[in-house]
Image (spheres, rainbow, N blue to C red):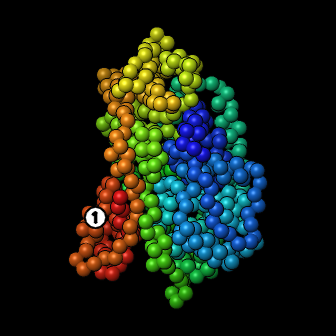
Amino acid sequence: MDEFAGRRDRGMSRRHWVAPALLCLGLTLAACGDMGRFQTAAPTVALPRPKPAVAQTPASEREHERILAAYGGTYDDPKLEALIGKTVDRLVAVSDRPDQGYKVTILNSGAVNAFALPSGQLYVTRGLIALASDTSELSSVLSHEMAHVLSKHAAIREDQARQAAIVTRVVTDMGNDPELTALALAKTKLTMASFSRHQEFEADGIGVGISARAHFDPYGAARFLAAMERNAELKAGKASLNPRAQDFLSSHPATPERVRNAQSIARQYTSPEGAERDRETYLSALDNIVYGEDPSEGFVRGRRFLHPKLGFTFAAPENFTLDNTAQAVIGVREGGSQAMRFDVVRVPAEQSLGEYLNSGWMEGVDKASTEDLTINGFPAAAATAKGDQWQFKVYALRFGSDVYRFIFASRQKTTESERNARETVNSFRRLTLEEIQAARPLRIKVITVQPGDTVESLSHRMTGVDRPVERFRVLNGLDKHAQVKVRDRVKIVVD
């Protein structure tokens, strides 16, 4: 897909955004988590799989394409693909259904996520891979998802999602309601019915057993559940959005009871001589993996959003947290009294932006408030809209062949909310060539601990992350009192 076709496709996919339920409509998969990012899907990169093959159906192919679109496409890394392929082969060989085929896709998303389709298609994000510390932890996730397939949990959940889509269609047909729009601004992640508590415990039990029989350390599941919980807590410390909304934990809560259960199951299989963590091999395969958002498809740095490929940037207001999703860039003010959404839409070249704002895509627009503007040299238009509980300020801005929308919602129209909207839109500008060239992805670098190195000194070598000491500990599976040892291999984040 060329760049301009990609822009058009993104514009079409984001035209409708009225309610959270509507966002669920196109993605009825048996997922264990939620959304990805604001970008065009990359081509499929399938891991080499031995027979038996996954049974492909038109429905599963459609779900696969939707997943790629939601999670940034595939992440092409031969070393990781080989490691995951070998791991899955070992797990399949000792499972109760060695005839069940699996196909694994690595998703180009920084979210910590994994899920399965009933057909046996498994998905893991590079964010999850980066968080795991050894192959046994990764195997615990893969075997857990295999267990959902083997127990037909994924098929049951797909049926639930299909029923939810019917309800969604009814909501969609009710029309464009500004009150639902406000909800969409504050909650934009795809939501799926969670697996039941019984299904989760059942999948844990089956998964730990599969990993143990494949001679992986059975305690990998408990360790990784703890790592994900700590990762979610670290995100919660900086964000006012739901910290688990896009992660595996959103539907796989790592409750103390669940961690204890995983540990209890692991004790039944413990074999110190044969249990592998395979940390060295894992870290070697992990070295240089992209960490967090991929700058080539747009990324958040603090309050600023930058899109090097499309060549623009803007800054959110003070006290706003930005979140880059597949549908839009979302900002929510601390406390939730204000929210914003930024996305791209298709507007015919012959239609003025003022006409577009009054074209009926959003109800409650005050046509008398519509005004034509020029923002940093770009044609633009603005209008206000009103609901019973939310007030809206909407901007449309033409940048090249694309039109971008800023939608601001506030509980009450105030001087501050007006200023926030105006300053955010006025911050929209072209990126300089130097800024585009400097927008490199963050990556995981695996290094060896040297004499004199400490958690603190190593964390200070990390770039582009907040709370680097805590982030270093989470990435390396270290609790708050643990220290590094000379000759240990550890992960740091660098640009």
In the image, residue 378 lies at what x, y percent? 41, 25
- Please tell me whether mark 1 sits on a helix, a strand or a loop: loop
User: In which quadrant of the rendered view does residue 23 lie?
Assistant: top right
View extreme (bottom): residue: 273
- Would residue 484 appear left or right of 258 to someone viewing this image? left
> Is residue 287 in view?
yes
Quarter of the picture holding the C terminus: bottom left
Q: Is residue 164 above or below residue 405?
A: below
The residue shown at (35%, 61%) is 494
**In the depicted view, which residue is nearer to us: 187 or 200?**
187
User: In which quadrant of the rendered view does residue 7 lie?
Assistant: top right
In the image, residue 34 lies at what x, y percent? 55, 49
The residue shown at (61%, 71%) is 85
Q: Is residue 440 above or below residue 458?
A: above
Q: Residues within 10 Å of mark 1 (few under 14, many from 20)?
A: few
In the image, residue 317 lies at what x, y percent? 33, 34
Q: Is residue 221 above or below residue 57?
A: below
Q: Which residue corresponds to mark 1?
A: 461
User: In which quadrant of the rendered view does residue 31 lie?
Assistant: bottom right
Q: Is residue 284 above or below residue 233?
A: below
In the image, residue 11 lies at what x, y percent? 56, 34
**In the depicted view, which residue is nearer to us: 141 or 446?**
446
The residue shown at (30%, 36%) is 318
**In the rendered structure, which amino acid carries the disc numbered 1?**
Arg
- Would residue 453 appear left or right of 283 to someone viewing this image? left
